[in-house]
Structure formats: structure tokens, C-alpha cells
């Protein structure tokens, strides 16, 4: 079975003269990517990285991510991406839990960390610093790497990358994907979502550590280009299309809103694109209708998770343009991709029929093998037949369209970013003025949903919204902080004394038909 290792070697040899990466005016050909990633692969192995000792990447968007990813694929090293938006404690936990042998980051991000708290004692590599005590300089390290690659040949069951996502316990879990599942995800993506060729260019405006990064290899496999934007700005995005030939992208609905609001020049640029995929957060029918009017039938809606990369389901122009009211189908996430089996079950695990509401299960050869170093968590989300339990409550109609109703787990998706309430609750509960706390999502027309903390204070005279939000500064990522704090005399609880979050949500979601995308 084909591995990412073999697939990338094939592309690097076949497309040597073509441009592989564009980053703020810098272009890197496949030949240059071949030479640099080969030397880097040897250097990383020399630092002790391998299948069981990952390389952790704690960076924003730039060409280094593509280069490191390529080096890891070629050397058979497990790669762990860490969002640059995470707080120090969150990053340090992931590095420690993964057992990373190497941490590649920047001077600014390293300054936010406590190296002494990194139990795995990774070798530190700075992409923008000079060789110094306690760390390596990226370019110097790369230059020292041998030209000839000597790496073990891996099978499809060997680890390829780990994508950390949070669990209901409040600590991240690492969705571990194998060489085989990453190739299967690529085939699923190219076969069901992306229509592209060697002249195409993927504009990465969303974080490479998340959904956008999953498309790097797809475009490298085609001999196409990856255009890296350091941040999302509508005008910057439009220039990447007009000046550099950007043809594809992936973003969350919030970004679609921003493109529309940026004006006719930006919208006209977007209309030059071949496809614009989006997902990761709710979108209303009205918002989808406005995007369709602004950009034309090039929108592709996808659904997936860290455990089962998109597209598990996909809504394509052929689906919605044939409908009497195209925008009405925005309330669905489309149909199952050709690589995906779907099922809906009730609380007793019994299979439900079309139109019946229950937990969505999916199965496919691109689904993770399990959680990194966490057999118990893995057993919780897979049944005996290999079905992955998504935790999402959905209905599949008689035409196969999937409509999401709620989340069985507590995940909040705000602006396409995952926020797990237990993470926020854990930090807020440590505040001396907080007796009890429950964190929920509440409807937000711009972000899909925003974070709200429902707090039972120890003393109403001293507790304040401002003080509690300030308490979170530096303890969790900024996007996870509540935008609103509601003070209550008590939290609603069931017979087992567990907080009934559904009862809290009903107060704020009344009249809203959709709670998830």
C-alpha cells in the first residue's frame, strides 16, 4: 500500500522544475524542496526524532511548516502540529504528552514557554534565531544535514502525524493518523472535494496546523503550488488570487463573511477561483445565499473532525445548484463522501432509519487509528465494528443529506476553532470567586457561536465579568475566552447531580434550528 513517504518522493522527482511553495514573495521549487527537506530529514533524525519520537511544530503560517512536514514524511518521522494561538500551558502539555524529540518554533513563541516544563526535553530549533545556548538555528541545522537521505522505509500502519484535539476531560487528545490513513485521506479529498491539476494553487489562509494543512500533500501530489499567507486578510487573499494564481482555498464561514464585506474588488477576485471549500462552523441559509450571490457556484461545504479529516460529507455545486432553492441546502453538510460509510444510532446503540435523529457514526479507511498513547480514550470512540462515534447528533434524510442537530459532546465551534468547555471550566474553577461554572456556546451571527461562562459565584459582591475574563489571560488561548459571563444562583442539575447543559443552552438557543455544522 502506498505511503506518504513514497508519494512525496514521486512528486519531488516528477515536478523538479515547478514551483511548490510561495510564501510572501519567496518561491521554492520542487527541486529546492527536495534538497532542503532531504537535509532537514537527516538533521531531525540526528536529533533523535522518529516514528515514536515526534517532531512538534509550534509556528504560525509560513514555508517552514511545508518544509518540515515534507522532511518528516521522507524520514518517516511522526509530525505534531501545535497552533501558535495556544497558551503556553496547552503547548507544553502537547509536547510532553507526545514525547516530542524536537520542538521547532520561533523566538517569540519560545519566549512564551518554560523550557524547564518540557518533560520530554526536546531539542529546540528556532526558525528565526542564531545558534545559541539551549537551541539550534534552523538554517544552520539544515545546512549540516547530509545530502543523501538514509531513512527507514515504513509500512502503511506506521504513524504519520498526530493532530491534538481536546476531550471532555479538559486535556487534549492526539488523533493519530498512519501512513496509510493519510494517503487514504488524500485520495478521499481529491476524489470527492477538490477538482485540481498541476496548474492549480492552494491559498492557505487558515492555520496550517488544522484543516488547511491537510491539503498540503494533496497539492504536492499533483505537482501544484501551495501559497502560504501569514494571516487572513481579504485584500491579501485577493492578491494571492490575482497575482499568484490562487485557485483553491479552505476557510471557515466567518472568513466568507469578511470577504463579502470587503467589497466588489475582493468578490471579483474570488470569482476567479475554481473552488472555495469551507466548514468547521455553522452557516445560516441567508449567509450561504449571500456568499453564493457574491462568489458564484464555486462553494464546497465539507464536514470532518480531527479524527476523521474532511470530507466525511461534502456539499458540492452539483448538489445545491440543482435545487429549487440552493441556499436551503446550506443547512445540511451534504452527503457522505465516496470513502465514507454513515450510520445514525440511538442511545442504546440501535441503528436508526432515514429521518430519525441520533448520534452520527462514520467509518472509512482515512479515519485515525486511535488516540496517541491513550487506549482508554480510543476505546470510548470506536465500537466493535470499527465505527467512529462522532458525538454529533444528526439526521440523514432519504436522499442521503446529513443535517446536524446538536452535539452529544460539549464541543463549541467559534469561528471554525474548537473550544472544549471543560478546558475553560478547569481554569475558571480555580478562581477564588467561583463556586461552580458551566461553559456553553451561545448563538453569534458572525462567529456561529461564542463562548459563555455560566457562573455561580461565592460572593456576588466581589465577582465580576471583567475579573473572570482577565483571570483567563495567559492561561488559555484568547479565542477560548468567554465573550460573556452570566451569573446564576445555581446551575440546573439532574438526578445524578450532573449539570444539565442542555437546559442552559435552551435559554439562549430558543428558536434556532441549527446548532452545529
Image (cartoon, helix red, strand yellow):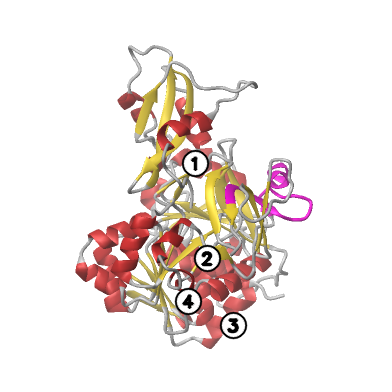
At horizontal 62% and vertical 58% (from top left) the residue drawn is 48
Q: Which residues are magenta?
A: 370-394
Give whichever of discs 3 and 1 has the lower sequence position: 3
Gap in Å between the C-alphas at discs 2 and 4?
A: 32 Å
Q: Residues within 10 Å of mark 3 (few under 14, many from 20)?
A: some
Q: Is residue 502 above or below residue 196?
A: above
Determine whether, in the image, residue 57 is placed left or right of residue 50. left
At horizontal 40% and vertical 65% (from top left) the residue drawn is 325
User: Residue 314: which disc?
Assistant: 2
Q: Residues within 10 Å of mark 2 (few under 14, many from 20)?
A: many
Gap in Å between the C-alphas at discs 4 and 3?
A: 13 Å
Q: Nearer the viewer, residue 85 or 260?
A: 260
Q: Position of residue 43 (x, y in %)?
A: 55, 65
Q: Nearer the viewer, residue 397 or 424?
A: 397
User: Residue 33: which disc?
Assistant: 4
Q: Nearer the viewer, mark 2 or mark 3?
A: 2
Amino acid at each position: 500500500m502506498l505511503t506518504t513517504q513514497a508519494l512525496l518522493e514521486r512528486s519531488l522527482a516528477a515536478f523538479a522544475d515547478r514551483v511548490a511553495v510561495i510564501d510572501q514573495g519567496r518561491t521554492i521549487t520542487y527541486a529546492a524542496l527536495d534538497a532542503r527537506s532531504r537535509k532537514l530529514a537527516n538533521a531531525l533524525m540526528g536529533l533523535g526524532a522518529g516514528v515514536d519520537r515526534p517532531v512538534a511544530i509550534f509556528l504560525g503560517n509560513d514555508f517552514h511548516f511545508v518544509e518540515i512536514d515534507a522532511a518528516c514524511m521522507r524520514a518517516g518521522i511522526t509530525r505534531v502540529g501545535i497552533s501558535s494561538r495556544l497558551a503556553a500551558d496547552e503547548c507544553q502539555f502537547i509536547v510532553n504528552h507526545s514525547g516530542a524529540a524536537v520542538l521547532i518554533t520561533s523566538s517569540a513563541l519560545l519566549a512564551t514557554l518554560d523550557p524547564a516544563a518540557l518533560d520530554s526535553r526536546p531539542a529546540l530549533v528556532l526558525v528565526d534565531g542564531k545558534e545559541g545556548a539551549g537551541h539550534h538555528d534552523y538554517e544552520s541545522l539544515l545546512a549540516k544535514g547530509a545530502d543523501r537521505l538514509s531513512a527507514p522505509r515504513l509500512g502503511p500502519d506506521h504513524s504519520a502525524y498526530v493532530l491534538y484535539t481536546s476531550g471532555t476531560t479538559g486535556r487534549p487528545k492526539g488523533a493519530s493518523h498512519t501512513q496509510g490513513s493519510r494517503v487514504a485521506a488524500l485520495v478521499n479529498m481529491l476524489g470527492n472535494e477538490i477538482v485540481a491539476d498541476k496548474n492549480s494553487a492552494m491559498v492557505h489562509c487558515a492555520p496550517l496546523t488544522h484543516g488547511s494543512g491537510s491539503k498540503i500533500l494533496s497539492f504536492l501530489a499533483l505537482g501544484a503550488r501551495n501559497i502560504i499567507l501569514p494571516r487572513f486578510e481579504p485584500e491579501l487573499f485577493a492578491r494571492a488570487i490575482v497575482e499568484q494564481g490562487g485557485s483553491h482555498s479552505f476557510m471557515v464561514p466567518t472568513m466568507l463573511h469578511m470577504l463579502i464585506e470587503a467589497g466588489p474588488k475582493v468578490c471579483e477576485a474570488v470569482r476567479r477561483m475554481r473552488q472555495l471549500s469551507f466548514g468547521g462552523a455553522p452557516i445560516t441559509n441567508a449567509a450561504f445565499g449571500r456568499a453564493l450571490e457574491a462568489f458564484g457556484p464555486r462553494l464546497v461545504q465539507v464536514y470532518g473532525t480531527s479524527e476523521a479529516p474532511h470530507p466525511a460529507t461534502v456539499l458540492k455545486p452539483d448538489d445545491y445548484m440543482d435545487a429549487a432553492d440552493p441556499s436551503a441546502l446550506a443547512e445540511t453538510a451534504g452527503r457522505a463522501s465516496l470513502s465514507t460509510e454513515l450510520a445514525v444510532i440511538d442511545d442504546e446503540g440501535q441503528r436508526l432509519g432515514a429521518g430519525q435523529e441520533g448520534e452520527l457514526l462514520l467509518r472509512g479507511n482515512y479515519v485515525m487509528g486511535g488516540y496517541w498513547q491513550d487506549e482508554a480514550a480510543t476505546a470510548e470512540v470506536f465500537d466493535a465494528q470499527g465505527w467512529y462515534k462522532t458525538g454529533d447528533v444528526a439526521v440523514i434524510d432519504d436522499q442521503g443529506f446529513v443535517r446536524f442537530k446538536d452535539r452529544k459532546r460539549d464541543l463549541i465551534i467559534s469561528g471554525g476553532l474548537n473550544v472544549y468547555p471543560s478546558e475553560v471550566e478547569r481554569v475558571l474553577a480555580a478562581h477564588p470567586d467561583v463556586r461552580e461554572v458551566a461553559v456553553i456556546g451561545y448563538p453569534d451571527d458572525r462567529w456561529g457561536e461564542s463562548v459563555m461562562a455560566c457562573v455561580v459565584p461565592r460572593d456576588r459582591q466581589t465577582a465580576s465579568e471583567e475579573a473572570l475574563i482577565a483571570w483567563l489571560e495567559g492561561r488559555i488561548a484568547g479565542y477560548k475566552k468567554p465573550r460573556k459571563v452570566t451569573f446564576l444562583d445555581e446551575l440546573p442539575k439532574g438526578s445524578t447531580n450532573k449539570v444539565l447543559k442542555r437546559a442552559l443552552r435552551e435559554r439562549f438557543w430558543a428558536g434556532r434550528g441549527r446548532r452545529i455544522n
